[in-house]
Image (cartoon, helix red, strand yellow):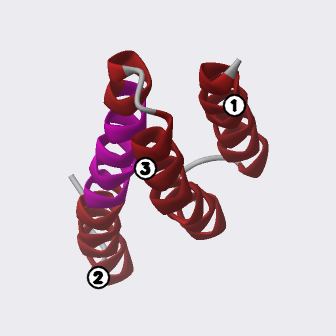
Amino acid sequence: MANTTSAKKATRKIARRTEVNKSRRSRVRGFIRKVEEAIASGDQALAQAALKAAQPELMRAATKGVLHANTASRKVSRLASRVKSLSA
């Protein structure tokens, strides 16, 4: 348990950031799930729209430090290639 005032404050700050990050991570997962479901349904227009909504959300998570930038880029790239393959 924290003893000093600064350590107690740091603990409070960490708790707040953890809540925000959990919320962001959950939001990103929701957007990815929508793209996955659209891909599974085979509707390319719906999948394209879902990807267009998910991409900025993933990049925002990377900017905020919830995801590593390369992880976000990789996820976007893989989803985009799967959406593109629906047309073939």
Disc 3: which residue: 50
**Left or right placement of residue 26 versus residue 39 in this view:** left
The residue sitting at 34% across, 68% down in the picture is 17
* Tag 3 secondary structure: helix
> Secondary structure beneath disc 2?
helix
Q: Mark 2 or mark 3: which is in front?
A: 3
Q: In the picture, residue 3 is in which quadrant?
A: bottom left
* Amino acid residing under circle 2: Thr
Circle on res. 84:
1
Q: Which mark is residue 5?
A: 2
Q: Position of residue 80 (x, y in %)?
A: 68, 37
Using the numbered discs, state the Cα–Cα distance from disc 2 to disc 1 in whole angstroms.
Answer: 54 Å
Is 67 situated above or below 53?
above
Residue bounds of the magenta highlight: 22-36
Q: Give the Cα separation between the discs numbered 1 and 3.
A: 13 Å
Amino acid type, residue under disc 3 in the picture:
Ala
- Callouts 1 and 3 close, C-beta under 8 Å: no
The numbered mark, 2 or 1, whose residue comes first in the sequence reads 2
Q: Are marks 2 and 1 in contact (CB under 8 Å)?
A: no
Q: Amino acid at mark 1?
A: Lys
Residue shown at 32%/21% (left/top)?
Answer: 41
Q: Residue at x 74, y 36 (%)?
A: 77
State the residue lying farthest toward the front: 88
Q: Earlier in the sequence, mark 1 or mark 3?
A: 3
| Alpha carbon distance from label 2 to label 3 | 46 Å
Residue 19 in the image: state x and y as whole percent.
23, 61
Dot 2 or dot 3: first in sequence order is 2
Q: Which mark is residue 4?
A: none
Q: 84 or 54: nearer the eye?
A: 84
Of the 4 image quadrants, the one containing the C terminus is top right
With 33 as the anchor, is 48 left or right in this view? right
Residue 46 counted in the magenta span: no
